[in-house]
Image (cartoon, grey):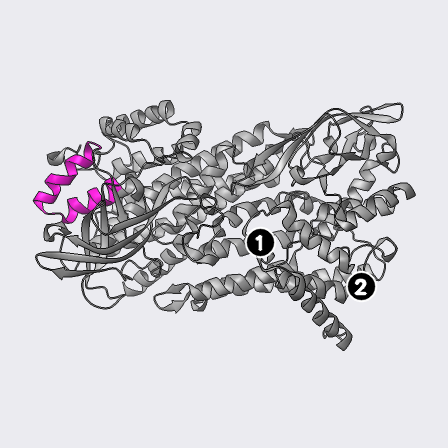
Amino acid sequence: MDFSYSEEQELLRNSVARFLADNYSFETFRNVSRSEPGWRRAIWKQFAELGLLGASLPEAFGGLGGSAVETMIVMEAFGRALVVEPYVPTVVIAGGLLRAAGSEPQKQEWLPRIASGDAVIAFAFAEPQGRYNLADLATTARKHGAGFVLNGQKAVVIGAPFADALIVTARTSGERRDNSGVSVFLVDARAKGVSRRDYPTMDGLRASEITFENVEVPAENLIGRHDDALSVIEQITDEAIAAHCAEALGAMRVMQESTVEYSKTRKQFGVPIGKFQVLQHRMVDMFMQVEQSASMVLMVTLKLGERAEERKKAASATKVQVGRAGRFVGQGAVQILGGMGMTDELALGHYFKRVTMIDTLYGNTDHHLARYASLQKRS
Amino acid sequence: MDLTFSPEEEAFRAEVRSFIEEHLPPHLKGRIRRDLGTKEDYLSWHRKLYNKGWVAPNWPKQYGGTGWTVPQRYIFNEECARAETPPILPFGVSMVAPVIYTFGNDAQKKKFLPRILSGEDWWCQGYSEPGAGSDLANLKTRAVREGDHYIVNGQKTWTTLAQFADWIFCLVRTDPNVKPQEGITFLLIDMKSPGITVKPIIVLDGVREVNEVFFDDVRVPVENRVGEENQGWTYAKFLLLHERSGIAGVARSKKAIERLREIATAEQVDGTPLLETDEFSRKVAEVEIDLTALEFTELRTLAAESKGKPPGPESSILKIKGTEIQQRITELTLEAVGYYAYPDPHAFGENEYPVGPENAVGAAGVYFNMRKASIYGGSNEIQRNIIAKAVLGL
C-alpha cells in the first residue's frame, strides 16, 4: 500500500496549483462567469499546453497516459480556484467514454482534439422527468437508413453553450426506465434540429436546455454497443462523480481554511471569535468532515478500476460523504463569517454554491445513500 | 383548556379570508417568495390592510392596534401566509413602533405612529456595524451634542431595504467613557438628511437586500431622541425581544411545507412521487413535527403575553427553532427540485419564462438566502447564550 504521489504527479500538482494561482483569481472567476461567453477559450488552450486536458488520456491519442489519480489532482485544484471551464464533461465524460467504448476511428478523431484543447464536449444525459435515473429516457434514437434520428429534450447540460459536440444518451428500444435499450451517441452540436436555450447556473457555470428534433445522426457516431450502453454510462458517471467529489474537496478546503483564518482575526467581545469554544468545536467538526471527504475521494479514485459493484459502492459512498460534508462545511462557514459570509463580494459564498450544486449533480446524497444500500442488499 | 376555535373565531377566519381574496391582486400573491419585490409591492398591500385597520395587530388599540385576541392574531397570520400576501415588514410596525409608544414622548407618538401605520414612512434598522455584530454594544457610530442637534458620524451595515427607507432608527454612542452599554442613545434619523449615503450589499442569491449606511456629520434634532440620553441599550434590548417573538414565522413555514409537498408530489422517482418515497416522506414528517412543537411553544408564549406577561428571554427559543425550521424547509425544497436547482433565475427577464418547472424556480436562491436567518436578529449562538444565562442561570 502506498498513498504517495509519484514524481510526475507531484509535478502536476505543483504546476496546476501555480498556474491557477497566477491565472485564475477569484476576481477572474467572477468576471468570466458574469460576462459572455462565460468561459475562456484561451485558458482552455493553456490547460492543454500544461497537459491537463490529456493528463488521463492514452499516450497513443495525444494524452499523457495518466490515471484517475491525475484527474483527482487536477479537479481538487480546480475546486480551489472555482474553475468554470467544462473539464469533467469534455475530459472525464467524453474522453473516458471514448477511451472505454469508442471505436478506433472515434478515438482517433476525438481524443487528440480533446487533449489539444480543440474540442469541447458536453454530456446531455439528464431529462426533465428523469430525476437521477440514467435509464429514465424519453429521448429516442430510431434507426433511419444507415443512421439514427434523435428526438427529445435534455435538461441542464453543463458546458453546452460552448460545446462542439454532445454526448447524448437515448433510448433505442424498450420502455422508459428499462436498463436495456439505452444507447449513447456523439452528436455535432450544430447539427440540424439541435436547439438550445442557454443560461447561467447558480454556481457560475453555463448550461442549456437542449431539444433534439429529428436530428440525423450517422451510424458511426454510435459509441459502444447499440441498446446496451447503460453499464458504460454508469462507469463513466462514477468516474465523473469521483472527479466532482475531488472538486468539492478543493472547494471545502478553501471554505474550512478561510473560516479558521477569519475566526482568528474577527474580534467580538474583545477577543477573536475563534476563542469561543462553541465555534471551535464547530470548526473542528468542519475540519473532520473535510478530512473524511479527502479519504473518500482517494478511496473512490483508487477503486474506479474495480469490478462494477465495488466501483458503484465506492462512488455512491463518496458522493454521500461529500454531499453531507459540503452542506455542513458550507453552512458552518457562512454562519461563522456571519453577514460577511452572506455577501456576493466574498469568495466564500461562491464556494458554498459550487459545493451545493455538486451535490445535485449525478444524484444527490439521498439518491446515492439508496443506491449504496441496495447494492449492499444485493451483495 | 380547549384546542378548537369558537364559532366567532371561525367567523373571523372567514372574514379575513374573504378580505384577502377580494383585495390581494394576483400578481402580489407569492411575489415576495419568488423575489425581493419592489417598494410598491410591499406598500400597496400595506395600504390595503391600513384602510381596513389591520396593519398592526401587535399594537395597543389606542395607537391603532386591532385589539385582537391571541387566537385572532394567530388566525390572521395563518390566513396571510396561506394566501401568500406580501409581509408587513417588521422595521416600522413591529420594531420601532413599540419602542416609540413605550418609551417615546407624546410629540413623537403623534408624529411617527400614524405614518408608520399608514405606510407613509418606511423604516429601516440601524443597529449592526462592521465591528459590532453579535457584540452589538461595541457600536462606534458617534453622536455629539451641539445645541439642539446631535452630530452623527459613523457607519451601519446589513441594513435591510435601506434603499427604500424614509427613516432609520439608530443606536449611537453618546458617551465613550463608560461601560459600552451605558453610553448608547436611541435616535430616529431622517434618511433624507444631508450626509447620509446608502451603498448596496449584494447577497448570495444575487439580490440587493441589505446595505451599508454611512453618516457624515449628519445633524439630528434632539427631539428625535427616544427616551433618555445614554439609556438606548434598554430600548434596544426591548426591541430585540419584540423582534424575536415575531421571528418564529410558524404560519409562513406551514405554507412553505405545503409548497414543498406539492413540489415533491410532482417530482417523480422512477414513477413514484418523491413525497411517497420512505426517505423523503420521513424528512418532511420530521420538519412538520418540529414545526408543530414550535407552533404550540409560540401559542403558549402568546397566551402568557395576553395575560400580561411581556416577552422574556424564552423568546430566543422561537428565534432559534423558527429559523432552523425555515432553513430546513429550504434544504428539503432544494433537494426536491433535483437538477432544476441549477438555473440562475436572475438571468431571465421579467417576461421570460424561466427554465424548468415553475415551482422549482428560485429553490436554490431561497436556500442560500435563508442562511441569513440564523445570523440576523442576534445570531443563534447569541440566542443560546441568552437562554443559558437568562433562563438557565448558567
Depth check, front residue: A170 or A267: A170
**Left or right: where does residue B203 sit relative to residue A200?**
right
Q: How many marks?
A: 2
Residue flagged by tag 1: what amino acid is it?
A: Arg
SS at mark 1? helix
Q: Which residues are magenta?
A: A90-117
Dot 2 surroundings within 10 Å: few (below 14), some, or many (20 or more)? Answer: some
Please tell me whether residue B274 is drawn above or below residue B318 in the rendered image: below
Q: Residue B387 at x, y = what percent?
A: 72, 49
- The main secondary structure of the magenta stretch is helix
A368 is within the stretch colored magenta:
no
Q: Residue at x 65, y 63 (%)?
A: B293
Residue flagged by tag 2: what amino acid is it?
A: Trp
**Left or right: where does residue B265 sit relative to residue B45?**
left
**Left or right: where does residue B216 sit relative to residue A116?**
right
Q: Chain of mark 1?
A: B
Depth check, front residue: B228 or A195: A195
Circles 2 and 1: CB distance less than 8 Å? no
- The quarter of the image holding the C terminus of chain A is bottom left
Classify residue B309 by image quadrant.
Answer: bottom right
What is the number of the mark on residue B68? 2
Q: Residue B94 at x, y = what percent?
A: 75, 49
Q: Residue at x 38, y 36 (%)?
A: A79
Question: Alpha carbon of mark 2 to alpha carbon of mark 1: how far?
Answer: 27 Å
Residue extending farthest bottom:
B7
Q: Residue B6 at x, y = what percent?
A: 76, 76
